[in-house]
Amino acid sequence: MNHERLPGSQDEKLETNIAERESGSHLLDMFLWGDAGLDEYAKARTDAPEKVALMKEVIYTFLDQEIQNTRIYESRGASFPYTVIRIKDLARALYNIERTSIAEPTDETNRALSPETILPTKHVEFVMTSVLATVHGHPFTFCEEAIHQTMRALPAALTALENGEEPEDIEIYTLGFPTNELGTMDASFTDAMVESPFKTLGSLYGESVEKLALENKKQNQKMELVFTGISMGANFAAEAATALLDKGLVTQSREGTSIEQPHLTLNLYTPAGLNEAAMRRLQISLGFGAEAVFQLATNPVVRKISPNEGKFLEKLKTVLKKEGIEAHMDEEQAKRKNKVTSMMGSIVQKLIREVTIDPNLVANKLVGTADPTLYSMERNRKLTKQKEKHPNSLGSHTIRELHPNQRTFGVHMSHTIPFFRASEFRRWDKVVEKVEGIKEKNRAQKT
């Protein structure tokens, strides 16, 4: 049985969000990932505290929307939490207007369109992440990626609203784990996760994409799908992609594609499970430990998030309980989940032994040259040669792959992706500029 919990309509949630924002309240008073980004933004913009204040409003409105959009996906004897940010809804909330203020195609108008009429392309990303304990694997794990994509899309969405136009249709889903406190696993699914965790959960993720995105695609609308797998999430993303490709529901080819079949892009970031070195077992297990120690000692973002994730989850559970979404950590669920999580659980142990992906998959891999779980002197030598041949170009970061369909890009970083960097904050500046312009416009209209 497939089950998706849907508390409240999108219109009701949008109105609630606007009312809460106007009253100065938000659903939570802490947002570790957003707060960490805001701290770094404040350091970079010491001369403009007003920018930081406006960005905090954006970040916490983002958080409100993601909490309101949190759901439970249930199938095959398991359930996991997930959330989605819809750029159009977030832009409306920031613009402080009702959904009905902008004309949007209805089912009736869609039916009235001729078969030749093509609707604007819908862009949908699914982020698949990592888990080392039951406190991890909630819908906000690696939500920095959702924030990143949101900041890229928001200026154009706000400009469209200013012009009385419909913003581009963009959604970013973050999929949690059945091992999280909000998820569940029955005995059969647990056995499958112990035996083959990546294929088991990856296949379930593929099914959820089918139900949440593919079945809701309008007949005359093209869809661009992106799977982003981070760390061990790279292997889950690859398995989910394989499941959908095997069913013929998506394609990775740009040749002869039709509007009915979405195109799928697969991005694998710091994919520790794809380490092919002879000493992979030792390197991956020690690499995770070394990375944790190094990041806690040197990275203020990690120091903000890692020790406080349990506190955030407790606050989140309190809010979600009001919507009928509760934690499941009785003795039996805890026993099952602990078989799969932790360094000794089946996910990490399988990752350490070897997890391959289909060589026919078209994939972009992003590897840190200082990543202790993937470090390779040979790879770094190849990159040095590439930089000599192709200075100041994408080619300087590209490593030739054994698999012709897969490209590997080497970037100077560790296993932890530095989401909050100077280039990102330039995007934040553009968002702040648009929000400030909207506020000034609203103030002018009231006077």
Image (spheres, rainbow, N blue to C red):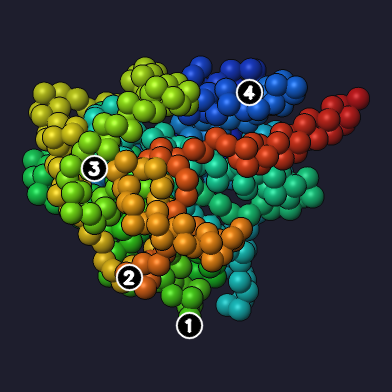
Amino acid at pointer 1: Gly
- Asked if one can make out residue 173 in the rendered structure from this viewpoint, the answer is yes
Task: Single out the mark in the foreground, 1 or 4.
Answer: 4
Left or right of 410, for residue 130? left
Q: Where is residue 174 drawn, in percent x and y?
A: 41, 43
Left or right of 73, for residue 127? right
Give the spatial CA distance, label 3 vs label 1: 41 Å
Give the residue at mark 2: 403
| Residue 141: quadrant of the picture | top left
Give the spatial CA distance, label 4 vs label 3: 34 Å
Amino acid at pointer 2: His
Give the spatial CA distance, label 2 vs label 4: 42 Å
Q: Which mark is residue 43?
A: 4
Q: Toward the viewer: 6 or 276?
A: 276
- Which structural element holds mark 4? helix
Q: Toward the viewer: 427 or 211?
A: 427
Give the residue at mark 1: 256
- Which structural element holds mark 2? loop
Which is more N-terminal, label 1 or label 3? 1
Q: Where is residue 11 drawn, in percent x and y?
A: 57, 39
Which is more N-terminal, label 3 or label 4? 4
How dense is the environment of label 4, judged by Cα within 10 Å: few (below 14), some, or many (20 and up)?
Answer: few
Amino acid at pointer 4: Lys
Q: Toward the viewer: 260 or 106?
A: 260
Which quadrant does the C terminus fall into?
A: top right
- Which structural element holds mark 1? loop
Q: Which mark is residue 284?
A: 3
How dense is the environment of label 2, judged by Cα within 10 Å: few (below 14), some, or many (20 and up)?
Answer: few
How dense is the environment of label 1, judged by Cα within 10 Å: few (below 14), some, or many (20 and up)?
Answer: few
At x 48% / y 42%, what residue is drawn? Answer: 145
Amino acid at pointer 3: Ile
